[in-house]
């Protein structure tokens, strides 16, 4: 199995501004884990390759250095694909980008809703051109967040449509199918050949998740969906079980999730789909 959405950042990469809303949204929980625990969770879920990243959004006191991601991945005993994390409001983000390129990173996690930048702004076009030239995949946090500092209007799929319209060769992934705006995400990925969506967290709210996968079938974009666990929020096994649970729903006289959809999510090589070799 291939997991396109796993985290490696630790509590020391989050400032105390995150404590209250994290506790309110997720309860009391220790978010620390070791590379060995990460490896065990991946192996338990049958994951053979995982994209690994942290989160950087300076307005929300979040910062994960490239060096941490590289060193973490070096200690994991499955195949990993390290991604850098950037805040396009950070005056030094070009330095972080160039450092990630030197380290051989293949993608970038971006969190505009927490970093408070508009991804559709033309001021970032030089960055998007550079990412395209280097074959870098952009993975956008899309949709909901419990962070009261965040700006939800910067987390809408139609903003990424603007990026794709100007940069059609740039490979982009909408995390979480932009929940709860999965319908809008489906329309964006249908329109733009190099835009994809991962399904992480969609099993957590079954009504929305069920409708999202059925809609993806109806609009013919299942092949543009990718599996992501969103570890450590969920393990890959929990994610796979959640997707199978959605597929087990068979409402009378209503469409249902096809076995082929679950097979695609859990068995396809999503890294090859994204052009990561």
Image (cartoon, grey):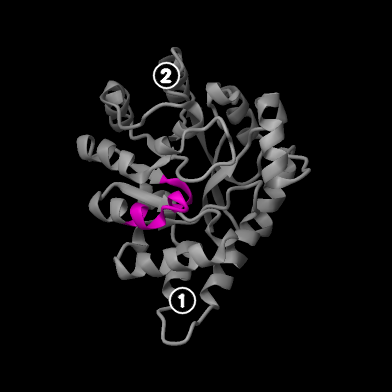
Which residue is under mark 1? 259
* Residue numbers of the magenta segment: 174-186
Q: Quick check: is 185 in the magenta stretch?
A: yes
Residue 157 percent location from the top left of the image: 36, 45
Residue 198 percent location from the top left of the image: 45, 52
Residue at image point 51% right, 74% down = 247
Against 130, residue 23 (above or below) is below
| Mark 1 secondary-structure assignment | helix
| Res 277 visible | no
Residue 244 percent location from the top left of the image: 56, 71
Q: Could you tell me how many numbered marks the image carries?
A: 2
Image side of residue 112 versus residue 49, left or right? left
Residue 53 percent location from the top left of the image: 55, 36
| Mark 2 secondary-structure assignment | helix
Against 204, residue 79 (above or below) is above
Q: Most extreme residue toward the bottom, as rendered?
A: 252
Residue at image point 41% right, 46% down = 174
Which residue is under mark 2? 98
Image side of residue 231 versus residue 33, left or right? left
In terms of image quadrants, where is residue 92? top left
Between disc 2 and disc 1, whose residue precedes?
Answer: 2
């Amino acid at each position: 199995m291939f997991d396109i959405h796993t985290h490696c950042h630790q509590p020391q990469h989050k400032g105390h501004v995150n404590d209250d809303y994290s506790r309110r949204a997720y309860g009391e929980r220790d978010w620390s884990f070791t590379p060995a625990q990460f490896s065990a969770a991946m192996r338990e879920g049958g994951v053979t390759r995982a994209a690994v990243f942290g989160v950087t959004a300076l307005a929300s006191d979040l910062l994960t250095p490239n060096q941490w991601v590289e060193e973490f991945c070096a200690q994991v005993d499955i195949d990993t694909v390290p991604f850098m994390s950037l805040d396009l409001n950070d005056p030094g983000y070009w330095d972080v980008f160039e450092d990630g390129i030197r380290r051989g990173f293949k993608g970038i996690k971006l969190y505009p809703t927490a970093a408070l930048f508009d991804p559709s702004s033309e001021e970032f076009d030089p960055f998007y051109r550079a990412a395209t030239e280097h074959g870098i995949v952009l993975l956008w946090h899309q949709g909901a967040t419990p962070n009261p500092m965040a700006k939800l209007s910067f987390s809408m799929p139609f903003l990424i449509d603007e990026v794709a319209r100007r940069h059609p060769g740039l490979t982009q992934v909408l995390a979480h199918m932009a929940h709860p705006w999965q319908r809008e995400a489906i329309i964006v990925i249908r329109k733009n050949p190099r835009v994809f969506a991962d399904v992480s967290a969609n099993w957590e709210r079954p009504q929305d998740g069920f409708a999202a996968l059925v809609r993806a079938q109806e609009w013919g974009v299942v092949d543009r969906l990718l599996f992501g666990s969103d570890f450590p929020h969920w393990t890959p096994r929990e994610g796979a079980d959640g997707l199978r649970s959605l597929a087990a729903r068979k409402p009378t006289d209503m469409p249902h999730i096809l076995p082929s959809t679950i097979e695609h999510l859990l068995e396809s090589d999503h890294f090859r789909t994204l052009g990561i070799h």
